[in-house]
Image (spheres, rainbow, N blue to C red):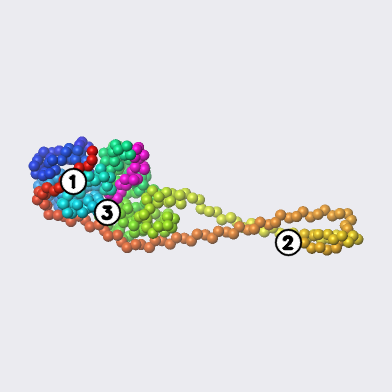
């Protein structure tokens, strides 16, 4: 994709109508170009789609003139709703000052490493890409800017929930298109895969099981209002919703001694699941057959000696003193038997964990209310520029 490919014609055509956007440097539009998606913009804003189909203006023109300051959703990669929810102070500034959420994100939020959606995780990205972490520590870049500028094109791992290798293995049609250079699998997941219910992790999160275990959210997911994986990360963790068919939420909470999954990192949960599933099941030890009790040795007859002989009785665990005659000849002593081992008590099997009760359904996020096309927005206070 060429820089400014989406906006180059519109920028020249609109000229002064752009308002304060006309004063933005090229770097701003290069970053905006990475986030704006025409198809997503039209799908997420049906009224804009109608206007575009009527040839009144292009999707790019509408976004630059109206949509950006109406805080309309313009991408599945960047969510205005999620960004404002994850950053309450930005939300307040947007409401009070009439700022554009995506403009604030490009100018300030990226450099401040602000979380911008629930799927991309800054800490996970740095752990999964130690070379990027090294560059960040050296002050050469930050996680968000690197991911948008390089990480997507380099198909870098960006979350412990999403595994690129699993995504391609579980979705062979995507793998074929990737091999042929027709798509970028990371962008495919953000734009299409997550909404198509495609699996992206073999051992941790299963989309089909999550919807079966939580039927109350199935309708919203099928309607495309939210993806299963976003619902899990945004609501499911804090609501302790069941998400893995091989291990219960109760087991995880007991292991970490917490009351909510949301206070545990995805990395920790995944490691616990992997260890639990890889551990072999304990084999019960069979109880040994008890050794027979030895018969006490009797004194031989025919001896006239009055010397007492000590006879050991194994079964009684004591000794008896009886006068016995001196034997002729001396009998061979009976070898002392080895004491029988105590039988191993068979371990009590662990109780089967009870399934987690379905929590109160998560509030389905409301679709963006279609705003009336606004006149050219009044200039607002420009956000503080990001440090160089």
Quarter of the image with the N terminus is top left
Residue occupied by mark 2: 317
Residue occupied by mark 3: 226
Quote the CA–CA distance across marks 2 and 3.
76 Å
Q: Is there CB contact under 8 Å for labels 2 and 3?
A: no
Q: Badge 2: how crowded within 10 Å, few (<14), some, or many (20+)?
A: few
Closer to the camera in the image, 52 or 266: 266
Magenta residue span: 117-135
Where 50 sits versus 298, above or below? above
Whole-percent x and y of residue 374?
11, 52
Closer to the camera in the image, 122 or 156: 122
Q: Sequence order check: which comes first, mark 2 or mark 3?
A: 3
The residue sitting at 15% across, 40% down in the picture is 24
Q: Is there CB contact under 8 Å for labels 1 and 3?
A: no
Of badges 2 and 1, nearer the viewer stands 1
Whole-percent x and y of residue 26?
17, 37
């Amino acid at each position: 994709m060429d820089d400014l490919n989406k906006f180059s014609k519109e920028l020249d055509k609109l000229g002064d109508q752009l308002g304060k956007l006309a004063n933005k440097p090229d770097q701003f539009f290069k970053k905006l170009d990475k986030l704006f998606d025409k198809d997503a913009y039209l799908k997420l804003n049906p009224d804009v789609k109608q206007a575009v189909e009527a040839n009144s203006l292009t999707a790019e023109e509408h976004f630059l003139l109206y949509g950006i300051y109406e805080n309309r959703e313009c991408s599945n990669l960047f969510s205005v709703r999620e960004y404002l929810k994850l950053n309450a102070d930005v939300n307040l500034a947007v409401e009070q000052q009439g700022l554009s959420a995506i403009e604030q994100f490009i100018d300030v939020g990226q450099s401040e490493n602000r979380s911008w959606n629930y799927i991309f995780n800054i800490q996970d990205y740095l752990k999964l890409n130690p070379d990027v972490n090294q560059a960040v520590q050296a002050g050469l870049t930050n996680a968000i800017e690197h991911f948008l500028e390089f990480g997507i094109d380099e198909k870098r791992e960006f979350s412990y929930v999403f595994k690129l290798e699993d995504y391609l293995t579980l979705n062979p049609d995507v793998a074929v298109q990737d091999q042929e250079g027709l798509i970028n699998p990371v962008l495919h997941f953000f734009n299409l895969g997550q909404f198509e219910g495609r699996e992206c992790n073999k051992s941790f999160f299963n989309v089909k099981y999550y919807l079966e275990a939580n039927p109350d959210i199935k309708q919203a997911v099928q309607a495309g209002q939210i993806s299963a994986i976003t619902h899990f990360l945004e609501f499911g963790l804090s609501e302790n919703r069941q998400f893995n068919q091989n291990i219960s939420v109760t087991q995880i909470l007991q292991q970490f001694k917490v009351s909510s999954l949301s206070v545990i990192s995805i990395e920790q949960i995944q490691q616990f699941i992997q260890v639990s599933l890889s551990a072999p099941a304990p084999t019960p030890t069979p109880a040994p057959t008890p050794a027979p009790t030895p018969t006490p040795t009797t004194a031989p007859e025919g001896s006239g000696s009055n010397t007492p002989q000590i006879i050991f009785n194994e079964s009684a665990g004591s000794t008896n003193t009886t006068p016995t005659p001196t034997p002729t000849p001396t009998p061979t002593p009976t070898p002392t038997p080895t004491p029988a081992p105590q039988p191993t008590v068979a371990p009590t099997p662990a109780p089967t964990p009870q399934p987690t009760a379905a929590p109160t359904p998560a509030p389905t996020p409301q679709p963006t209310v279609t705003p009336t096309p606004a006149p050219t927005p009044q200039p607002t206070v420009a956000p503080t520029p990001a440090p160089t």
